[in-house]
Amino acid sequence: MAMSSMLRSELILGIESSCDDTAAAVVEAGRRVRSSVVASQEDIHALFGGVVPEVASRKHVEVITRVVQEALDRANCTWRDLGGIAVTNGPGLIGSLLVGVSAAKAYHVATGLPLVGVNHIAAHLMSNFCDLPEQEGAPEDFPAVCLVASGGHSDLCLLTDFGQYEVIGMTRDDAAGEALDKAARLLGLGYPGGPALEKAAREGHDRFSLPRPALGDSYDFSFSGLKTALVRLIEELRGESPAGAVLPVADLAHSFQQAVVDTLVRNTMRAAEAYGARQVLLAGGVAANSVLRAELSAAGKRLGLPVRYPPLRLCTDNAAMVAAAGYHRLSGGQNDNTGLDVFSALDH
Ligand code: KG4
Ligand code: ZN
């Protein structure tokens, strides 16, 4: 990653507000995380069983300046120590994105620091290169295939260099995290569903056969059929059992999670082989799932391919990954400054 920087400092402030987390971070040279602050709105949205866009934007407005200040304080630096500002400008909830982008523009005008907009998916990819242990070798082995699986995305990306990637597969309906969240809701496991489902699945077995949807030769995903299969299975089990009998929630959670993991691993490894990837990377909230991590690693071992994943705290939405992604453009002398705009998922 050696590159001569055109910045007065290697410290970049990252800001992220594309969904329901308000985050700010200071990262040095695109990889050393000096601070990473995440104000989660999870408890509020849990009351509604999902993210309520209007509520999310309001909460971002309430906390963003404090979150940014906290990130500077924890990194032990002031505005004068920074070299630039990076902010997520899409895809995401338009009202939420606007809060982060407007704040970043104001900071840019007030401080004169260069400003860049960062694509949320590009940021997730960069989480793989942050805070690596010193001894870890060759993180910049390209091409690499990265699975970005979150509440909003199931994208397979082909990375050819830092910040350079192509989306080679995506979901045609629900994202993997969304499917896990919906399944958890059907099983009465609460929100966010991914971690709740993972916990319940630990007590269960792969007892029910559920589909592993495949879409011909493409690397795309489709999870809505799997969700429908779960709905039918639950109806069937309810119909069979005497009134009031409890559902085998742990076994259902286990079987559903296994079907999602198998599908993700299968497409990722097919793509890695087809594109001659030298390593497989993982990112996004679903990358926190221990079964997915273990099964992807095992599949990598079988193919002799290194599989790497970010530390847990960098898997879910954060601003360190945004700062890291922004660094590569800023250090090359690029900026968006006052011309920066937001784009919603619809524009993506
Ligand atoms: O990347 P992220 O924080 O936000 C989005 O950009 O969506 O991802 C959130 C998603 C949610 O669907 C959540 O259920 C899922 O990541 N998730 C998990 C786990 N932790 C979070 N899914 C499976 N296992 C987990 N341990
Ligand atoms: Zn995300």
Image (cartoon, rainbow, N blue to C red):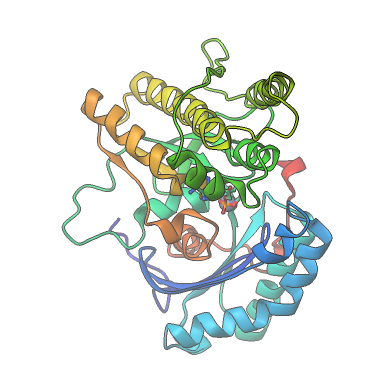
- As rendered, which of 129 and 234 lies closer to the eye? 234
- As rendered, which of 259 and 207 lies closer to the eye? 207
Lateral position of residue 341 relative to residue 88, left or right: right
Quarter of the image for the C terminus: give it: top right
| Above or below, 64 relative to 21 | below
Residue 123 place in picture, x, y as percent: 51, 53
Evaluate whether residue 284 shows in this view: no
Q: Residue at x 54, y 16 (%)?
A: 218
Residue 229 place in picture, x, y as percent: 66, 20
Q: What is the residue that sits farthest to the right in this orientation?
A: 54
Evaluate whether residue 186 shows in this view: yes
Q: Residue at x 52, y 86 (%)?
A: 79
Q: What is the residue that sits farthest to the top in this orientation?
A: 216
Lateral position of residue 20 relative to residue 33, left or right: right
Residue 58 place in picture, x, y as percent: 80, 70
Lateral position of residue 81 relative to residue 102, left or right: left
- As rendered, which of 113 and 186 lies closer to the eye? 186
